Amino acid sequence: MATEQKKLTKEQLMSSFGTLPDDATVEDFIDHLAFILSVERGVADIAAGRTITHAELLEEIKTWRG
């Protein structure tokens, strides 16, 4: 199921880059963009009702352990 994301403007992105230190590397910028994308996807999932409870997550995690 595709996640409908809010599209950030160039101005919003450039403003968020202002929070990075002056000596930020390209990798820092990439990590920052990945973080923003993850948050936006999470917000869109919440808005669309694609969530589970903490208890459901704990049960799902139990299945990860072989």
Image (spheres, rainbow, N blue to C red):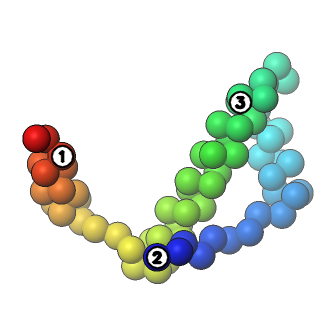
Where in the figure is residue 26, as x and y percent of width and height? 78, 29
Left/right placement of residue 53 relative to residue 41 reads left
Counting other residues with Cα less than 10 Å from the Cα at mark 1, is it few (<14), some (14-19), or many (20 or more)?
few
Q: Which mark is on residue 28?
A: 3
Q: Tell me the residue at 50%/62% (across/down).
A: 42
Q: Residue furthest front?
A: 66
Which image quarter is the C terminus in?
A: top left
Is residue 23 visible in the rendered image? The answer is yes
The image position of residue 6, as x and y in percent, is 68, 71
Q: Residue at the spot x=69%, y=46% of the render?
A: 33
Q: CA distance from mark 1 to mark 3?
A: 31 Å
Figure quadrant of residue 41: bottom right
User: Is residue 45 rendered to the left or right of residue 35?
Assistant: left
Give the distance between the C-alpha atoms of the residues marked 2 and 3, in whole angstroms: 30 Å
Residue beneath the point at 59% across and 76% down: 4
Look at label 2 and name its amino acid: Met
The residue singled out by tag 2 in the image is 1
Q: Residue 2 — which label? A: none
Q: Secondary structure at mark 1?
A: helix
Q: Circles 2 and 3: CB distance less than 8 Å?
A: no
Residue at the (77%, 64%) spot, across then down = 8
> Which one is closest to the eye, mark 2 or mark 3?
2
Q: Which mark is residue 64?
A: 1
Whether residue 21 is visible to the viewer of this picture, yes or no, is no
Q: Position of residue 17 (x, y in %)?
A: 80, 41
SS at mark 2 in the image: loop
Q: Is residue 14 above or below residue 60?
A: above
Contact between marks 2 and 1 (CB within 8 A): the answer is: no
- Amino acid type, residue under disc 1 in the picture: Trp
